[in-house]
Amino acid sequence: MKTKHTNSIGLNPERTQQLVEKLNLLLANYQLYYQNLRGFHWNIEGSSFFELHAKFEELYTLANTSVDEIAERILTLEGTPLHTFEDYLQHASITAAKGLTSAKDTVQTTIDNLSTLMVLEREILDLSGELDDEGTNALMSDYIREQEKTVWMLRAYLGK
């Protein structure tokens, strides 16, 4: 029940707005990460083509699902998700990766993009923990766990 001090899911509206702003930053960064992966999938060249073509498709499919989950979480928190490419480019710290075709460059950029996402996800995790927002907390924990594993595997692929 919504009260003067809580929103319809029982959270503090002012503090929830801070969380919505962070989630919108995450959403913008995920959109750039997703688009980078699509480009890598389409443009990868060399002896690793078949394995990386499939891996990038797996990663962008997962990223697409995450974009939807983040936008829906923003709506659940009674916020409005960013939804234009102009907004994404303005708010994201991940940049568009243009012209990358080698295994080394695309995999390293993917690692860097995931690292950027995890920093922001940890900030959101801290804030959602302070707010007792278990829904956002669980979502961030799931993302971080999977991304840490992906970074480990990609680093191993590069021999690092």
Image: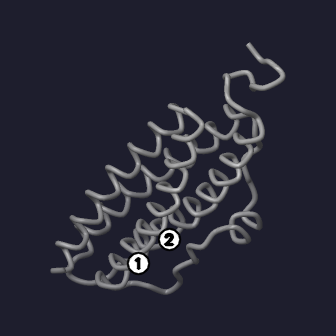
Residues tagged 2 and 1 counted as in contact (Cβ below 8 A): yes
> Which comes sooner in the sequence, label 2 or label 1?
2
From the top left corner, tell me how far across and down residue 57 is, in percent: 38, 58
Instruction: Identify the element where label 2 is drawn.
Output: helix
From the top left corner, tell me how far across and down residue 37 is, in percent: 45, 67
- Say which mark, if any, is on residue 44: none
Q: Is residue 76 above or below residue 92?
A: above
Residue under pointer 1: 109
Instruction: Identify the element where label 1 is drawn.
Output: helix
Q: Is residue 30 above or below residue 74?
A: below
Q: Residue at x 47, y 40 (%)?
A: 139
Q: Amino acid at mark 2?
A: Asn
Q: Amino acid at mark 1?
A: Thr
Q: How many marks?
A: 2
In three-dimensional space, the C-alpha distance between marks 2 and 1, rounded to whole angstroms, equals 9 Å
Quadrant that contains the C terminus: bottom left
**Side (left or right) of 49 relative to 7:** left
Q: Residue at x 42, y 49 (%)?
A: 62
Quadrant of the rendered image containing residue 113: bottom left
Quadrant of the rendered image containing residue 42: bottom left
Q: Residue at x 38, y 52 (%)?
A: 144
Q: Residue at x 67, y 29 (%)?
A: 11
**Residue that protrudes farthest toward the top in the picture:** 1
Q: Is residue 134 above or below residue 157?
A: above
Residue under pointer 2: 36
From the top left corner, tell me how far across and down residue 125 is, in percent: 49, 47
Quadrant that contains the N terminus: top right
From the top left corner, tell me how far across and down residue 130 is, in percent: 56, 41
Q: Is residue 27 above or below residue 43?
A: above
